[in-house]
Image (cartoon, grey):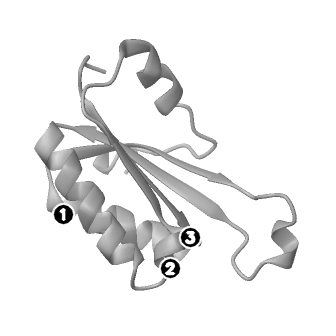
Amino acid sequence: MEKNYAVGMVEVQGFTTAILAGDAAAKAGDITIIAFDCNKPEGGDKVPIPLLLQLKFVGGVSDVEAAVEAARTAALKINKEEDIITHVIPRSYEDTMKLVEVSKIEIKGGNDDE
């Protein structure tokens, strides 16, 4: 991965919300989704939507900013404002990218897998 990409992160509750947010992000800017991560918080079995998902993507700063905003807007169709976390790192440090690329979920390439 090239250096100095902007990194966008959007954390939401629920798989459907994450897919909706990722789709909106991809349509809003020239970005590449690099990771789709999940975790189950402590006591997750007791909450209505126990699965937290984080979508991570890279691109130019303006594209990533537009993608994060589009993902947040899309996620608001399902999640409450307080259940959505977003952040943009404008020019990520090379070692930071190593952490961003870590994911529990493997993303397979589009048509390459057919």
- Of the image marks 3 and 1, the number of the one nearer the N terminus: 3
Q: CA distance from mark 3 to mark 1?
A: 19 Å
Label 2, secondary structure: give it.
loop
Residue 97 sits in quarter: top left
Q: Tag count in the figure? A: 3
Three-letter amino acid code at disc 1? Lys
- In the image, residue 34 sits, relative to residue 92, either above or below, namely below
- Numbered disc in front, either 2 or 1: 2
Three-letter amino acid code at disc 3? Phe
Q: Position of residue 109 (x, y in %)?
A: 37, 44
Residue 4 has which mark? none
Q: How many residues crowd around disc 2 within 10 Å: few (fewer than 14), some, or many (20 or more)?
A: some
Residue 49 sits in quarter: bottom right
Q: Quadrant of the N terminus?
A: top left
- Of the image marks 3 and 2, the number of the one nearer the N terminus: 3
Label 3, secondary structure: give it.
helix
Three-letter amino acid code at disc 2? Asn
Q: Which residue is mark 3?
A: 15
| Residue appearing at x 15%, y 47% in the figure | 63
Q: CA distance from mark 2 to mark 1?
A: 20 Å
Q: CA distance from mark 3 to mark 2?
A: 11 Å
Q: Quick check: 95 left or right of 70?
A: right
- Of the image marks 2 and 1, the number of the one nearer the N terminus: 1
| Residue appearing at x 50%, y 80% in the figure | 80
Q: How many residues crowd around disc 1 within 10 Å: few (fewer than 14), some, or many (20 or more)?
A: few
Residue 79 has which mark? 2
Residue 27 has which mark? 1
| Residue appearing at x 37%, y 67% in the figure | 21
Label 1, secondary structure: give it.
helix
